[in-house]
């Protein structure tokens, strides 16, 4: 019985090392997946910002046109 216990004790550090190694490898895999997700989200954000800037660019002239028309209407009323 003592030899079984001492054998188990000797294999414990090796088992512990193997478990730690598996945990580390699993964490590295998770980190890689998170990095890929971050890159994907950054690309999506840049795309959205680009779309948003395009929307603002096309909207601003329309607003300016509306302001010009408003001034023309006021000028027409004063004549």
Image (cartoon, helix red, strand yellow):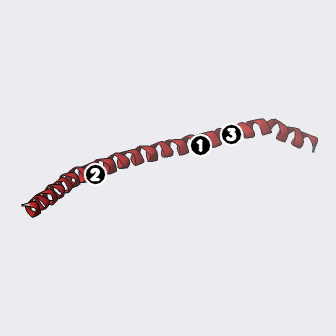
For mark 3, what is the residue?
Answer: 20
Q: Decide: marks 2, 1 in contact (CB < 8 A)?
A: no
Q: Residues within 10 Å of mark 1 (few under 14, many from 20)?
A: few
Tag 3 or tag 1, which sits nearer the N-term?
3
Mark 2 vs mark 1: give the one in front.
Answer: 2
SS state under label 3: helix
Q: Position of residue 12 (x, y in %)?
A: 79, 39
Tag 1 or tag 2, which sits nearer the N-term?
1
Tag 3 or tag 2, which sits nearer the N-term?
3
At x 17%, y 58%, the residue is: 66
The total number of labels drawn is 3
- The image shows residue 77, relative to residue 32, as above or below, that is below
Q: Residues within 10 Å of mark 2 (few under 14, many from 20)?
A: few
Q: Position of residue 59 (x, y in %)?
A: 22, 55
Q: Which quadrant, please, contains the N terminus?
A: top right
For mark 2, what is the residue?
Answer: 51
């Amino acid at each position: 019985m003592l030899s079984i216990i001492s054998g188990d004790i000797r294999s414990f550090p090796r088992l512990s090392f193997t478990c730690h190694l598996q945990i580390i490898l699993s964490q590295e895999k998770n980190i890689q997946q998170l990095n890929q997700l971050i890159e994907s989200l950054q690309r999506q954000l840049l795309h959205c910002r680009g779309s948003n800037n395009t929307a603002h660019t096309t909207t601003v002239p329309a607003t300016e046109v509306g302001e010009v028309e408003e001034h023309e209407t006021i000028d027409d009323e004063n004549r």
